Every structure is written in C-alpha cells, then in structure tokens.
Amino acid sequence: MSNRIQAAEALLRLKAGNSQYIQSNSYTGDVSSAIRANTAKNGQFPYAIVIACSDSRVIPEIIFSAGMGELFTIRVAGNVIDRHQLGSIEYAVSHLKSPLVVVLGHTHCGAVAATIAGEGDSHIQSITDKIHKAIGDETDDFTAASLNVKYAVAEILDAFRHDGLEEEQVVGAVYDIETGEVYWN
C-alpha cells in the first residue's frame, strides 16, 4: 500500500481529516489488526510528516483522522526544530518519500507560555530560548504559536534548501485545542 502522492494532495487529506474529526468528534483512523499486519509486512508509507508539540492534548493522528502508517510524527515540546528533528525529517523525505512536512503548533502551549513568562528551568531553557527567537515580545497566545510555527518552517526550508525540498512541501498550522480546528499559516 504505497501512498506516493504530491504535497498538495497530502495537504487536502489533512484538511479533510481535520474536518472529519471536528464533525464527528471521534477518532476514525484505521488501527485495525489488518493495517498492523499490512504495515508490518509492507512497511510504512506516510503521506505527511508532522512536527508537533509533546503536549498530551495534541495528537496529530487523531486531529487529522489518520490511521496507522499514514503520518510520520515527530514530537518535541514547543514544536521547535533542531538537528534531531531535521534528521528525522530527512529520513522521512528521503527514505519514506513523504511529500509534505507540517509544523503543527497549538494554542495554550506550555512551552510558549513559559517563554512569554520568562521561565526556563534547566533543560527546557534551550527550548524557550529558541521559541523566544521566534516570538520576540509577543504575548498573544495564538499569534505567538503562529510565529513559532513560521520560524520552524523557515528553519526547515533553510536546512533543506539544497536538497530539493520545495516551499510548498513545508507548511505551518496552529491547532486550537478548544475547538479542534487547525488553522493553516
């Protein structure tokens, strides 16, 4: 089962999946024993790479009504980009042939809130420092999340500018945890 589709079609699938999630208010992705057996035998063919926050309320497979093997998900607090995320993106683009990269921020993000508040204990400091570069002195929740996403998109495009990853293959979005809706940057 190969999902060799273009970035535009992958984006349409994500948008349709989010609409389905909002309307049904339930998870409809395929996690059946048949799909587990299929992916075990034939491998994974994710149609999108999603870099999302580690927040337990932000689950890309549910948000986009995606089943097993459909999304290559990378999660890190604040959906920031570093060499580990870039390596994972490179793997999914080069080896799994995923046509679309999505940076998914969200409202009420704890890492963004910590940045706005000027907090940063020990290990999270590297994350809040990165977010501060993205948002500056912005204090509005949605705007800060959106700026953080745009910064990450720019970092990905810059890192892969010589590797053939086109601008339309890397998109940003902000998930509203109250409504379930994804707003595309």
Image (cartoon, helix red, strand yellow):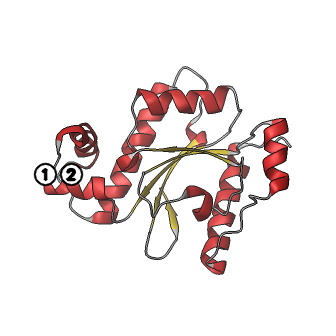
Q: Residue at x 66, y 26 (%)?
A: 94
Q: Quadrant of residue 93?
A: top right
Please indicate whether residue 177 sits to the left or right of residue 11 in the image.
left
Q: Amino acid at mark 1?
A: Gly
Residue extending farthest to the top is 162
The answer to whether mark 2 and mark 1 are in CB contact below 8 A is yes
Against 166, residue 48 (above or below) is below
Which quadrant does the N terminus fall into?
top right
| Residue depicted at x 41% and y 44% | 76
Number of numbered discs overlaid on the protein picture: 2
Q: Residues within 10 Å of mark 1 (few under 14, many from 20)?
A: few
What residue is shown with label 2? 115
Judged from this view, the residue extending furthest toward the left is 118
Q: Position of residue 71 (x, y in %)?
A: 65, 48
Neighbor class of circle 2 (other Cα within 10 Å; few <14, some 14-19, many 20+) is many
**Can residue 5 be spotted in the picture?**
yes
Q: Disc 2 marks which amino acid? A: Thr
- Label number found at residue 118: 1
